[in-house]
Amino acid sequence: MIKDRGNIKWTSLMLTEHREKLRELYERDKDIEKPVLDEQQLEKLDSLIREVVQFQAEVKIFYYENHRIRQYEGRISLKGNFLYLDNKRLVADNIIDIIIL
């Protein structure tokens, strides 16, 4: 069986623009769609946020951002109508899950 080197054997023949486009395509393959939460999950998140803000508990947040789900840890605070995790401003609609640490 012949062991193929994939794109490595062609990179010397490819233009820089082609290599960049291939990198973009590989990155775009990793993109995920925003999960849709049902009514029950939204109510659970709402009550958890209220509890965490009141008691200033340390949390881990799963947050949808730039076609990825990111994890952040810290304390949630409420300033005006906005949620903040330490100094990062959060959009409530993008919070996927919260775990109290």
Image: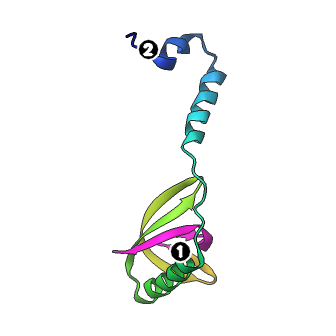
Q: Residue furthest left?
A: 101
- Report the quarter where the C terminus lies: bottom left
Q: Quadrant of residue 71?
A: bottom left
Q: Secondary structure at mark 1?
A: strand
| Amino acid type indicated by mark 1 | Tyr
Nearest to viewer (mark 2 / mark 1):
2
Q: Secondary structure at mark 2?
A: loop
Is 99 in the magenta? yes
Q: Quadrant of residue 18?
A: top right
Q: Position of residue 21 (x, y in %)?
A: 64, 29
Is 47 in the magenta? no
Inter-mark Cα distance, 2 to 1: 49 Å
| Amino acid type indicated by mark 2 | Asp
Are discs 2 and 1 less than 8 Å apart at CB?
no
Q: Quadrant of residue 27?
A: top right
Q: Residues within 10 Å of mark 1 (few under 14, many from 20)?
A: some
Vertical order, 45 against 26 (above or below): below
Q: Position of residue 67 (x, y in %)?
A: 59, 52
User: Can residue 87 be spotted in the picture?
Assistant: no
The residue that label 1 is drawn on is 84
Of residue 37 and residue 57, the one placed in the foreground of this image is 37
Q: Position of residue 57 (x, y in %)?
A: 38, 81
Vertical order, 31 against 51 (above or below): above
Q: Is residue 11 left or right of residue 80?
A: left
Residue range highlighted in magenta: 85-101
Q: Residue furthest right?
A: 17
The residue that label 2 is drawn on is 4
